[in-house]
Amino acid sequence: MTTPYGAELTDVTVTYGRGNRALDEASFAIRPGTITGLLGRNGAGKSTALALLAALRRPTSGSVRVDGADPFENAVVMGGVQLVREAGDVIGDSSIDESLGYYSELRPHWDSEYAFALLDQFGIDPSATPNKLSRGKKSALGCTIGLASRAPLTIFDESYLGMDAPSRYAFYDALLEDYTEHPRTIVLSSHLIDEVERLFEDVVVLHHGRAVVAETADALRGRAVSLVGPTTAVSKLADGRHALATRSLGGTTQLTLEGSLEPSEIALARDAGVEIARVSIQDLFIHLTQETDPVSADPTRKAAR
Amino acid sequence: MTATVSPVTARDQEQRGFSTSAFATFVGTWQIGLYFWIAVVLISAGLTVVLDTWSELDGSVAEGVLGSAPIFLSVMGIVVPLGMLPLHLAGGATRRSFVRGTVTAAVGLGVTFALAGAVGMLIEYAVFNALDWPTVVDNPGLYDSSGDFFAIWLSWSLSSIAYFLAGTAIGFGYYRWGGILGTVQLVVAVGLVIGGELALGGGLPSGMFGELFDSGPMPLLVGVLGCTAAIAALTYLVHRTLRDIPLKSGSRAAGC
């Protein structure tokens, strides 16, 4: 039984090369024993933030704490953090068995039986070499390593993008099942937000190297509501409020409004035949990361893109 | 929330990282090394037959061919640790344990490769003696005949360790510091290897540079201490390069 690790980044800046800031005074916390979604557009700093948690590098400035301690070269903390980068770190031209053997030697909570069961489930031959696997199978191998490590802080950084839909859903199911049986802290970084948001208990959104959201998934979903119904009724309800997105088809409009509705507004909406729905995290993510995006703000650049 | 692992477990973690790294590097290098040894034995035997046919056999053949083992180890010193580091760190082990494991593996590989080479030389010595062929070596150092088993073993052990560590320092030098500083590190590492070889006498660098100094073979103790100092300097170079090396986002374990 492991105690899940929490983690915290405080005012962390990471600079590459000549002043290129991957993280810019980013601050956020990851609660122990939760599944946290780390979201961000390409280049937002997700992989850099995760590499800091796994002690793959040091920050240029700021503080990184995992289980209350600086993880860098901390044998105990590093032994409890498993970062799976894309398809996982394995020896490409040796058998999968050998790479898993390396992990089993290093990882105190490694479950070999579970690892081989997962490989079997994903249709991967342990005697094969990773270099000869398809991209999807490589991703599945990385996911297997992450799950079988049973690390108190397990991080999947775009680990399952190459997998086909049935394999991804098999992974999500395996993740939830194993998380329930062996509680730990899990961080998922993904662009497939619609697929994985059901797993999130907390969400951190990075944008231009800064954390623009770090809260529970329910609190984030509560930031907006979606109204669907006759255009006139929806427009009336939206009057004077900030609309995040609008879609119309014939006389029906779907409108995403910032903030929540008062009970009286909810009653009005129902009387007018307007359905009220929760907004998906993906819709909110798009809104949160577009409004400050100069490319999106400039229609000419958007068209050129 | 508190850490749940005691300091004893921290030591266990370090030990686990050290032994896994050392074992994997040692075994991984030997797995490829077996092909190397098969090749050099066949080349030595073939070359001996050819030289004898042309009546050009004037000393040990194996010294030149088996003596390439340190060069092989320097290549493996670049490739194997560079490929292992991402896996090691992803497995949750420290750079500290990786350095200790790599240096230990370098010593183990140096000693065992040198032993294999010295045995090969001894076999050649026995065959050449039986056929009344000369057994002298081209560049006498700690040894001057293919039959000086222990001197060959000692000399090749030290130079093989130095070559492997130099390879590691060069590989990680380019990985970490880039082209310019990586080349500076290469020059330093190669300089240390040549210094160690000159101290020991024998080997390729002594053949190339020995005449420049014209000092002749050094006393055993001085030679061993000189090469040991070069190994210590290379170990420091490896440690200095690796102790806080950042893992690049695109880097993968060997072949990935």
Image (cartoon, rainbow, N blue to C red):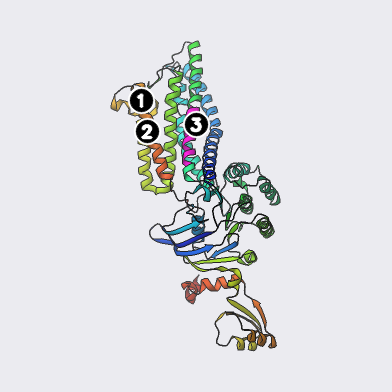
Residue A144 in view (yes/no): yes
Q: Secondary structure at mark 2?
A: helix
Whole-Å distance between the Cαs marked 3 and 1? 20 Å
Three-letter amino acid code of the residue under disc 3: Gly
Q: How dense is the environment of label 2, judged by Cα within 10 Å: few (below 14), some, or many (20 and up)?
A: many
Quarter holding residue B219: top left
Image x and y of residue A72, in percent: 47, 51
Q: Which residue is mark 2?
A: B230
Above/below status of A205 relative to B190:
below
Q: How dense is the environment of label 3, judged by Cα within 10 Å: few (below 14), some, or many (20 and up)?
A: some
- A252 lies left or right of B235: right
Q: Nearer the viewer, residue B109 or A60?
A: A60
- Asked whether the beta carbons under mark 3 and mark 1 sit within 8 Å of each other, the answer is no
Residue B206 in view (yes/no): no
Whole-Å distance between the Cαs marked 2 and 1? 11 Å
The boundaries of the magenta stretch are: B98-113
Query: What predominant SS class does the magenta segment belong to?
Result: helix
Q: Which residue is mark 1?
A: B223
Q: Nearer the viewer, residue A47 or B50?
A: A47
Image x and y of residue B136, in percent: 41, 16
Tell me whether marks 3 and 2 sit on the same chain: yes
Residue that appears at 64% across and 88% down = A233
Q: Which residue is mark 3?
A: B108
Q: In the rendered structure, does residue B111 fall within the stretch colored magenta?
A: yes
User: Mark on residue B253?
Assistant: none
Three-letter amino acid code of the residue under disc 1: Gly
Whole-Å distance between the Cαs marked 3 and 2? 17 Å
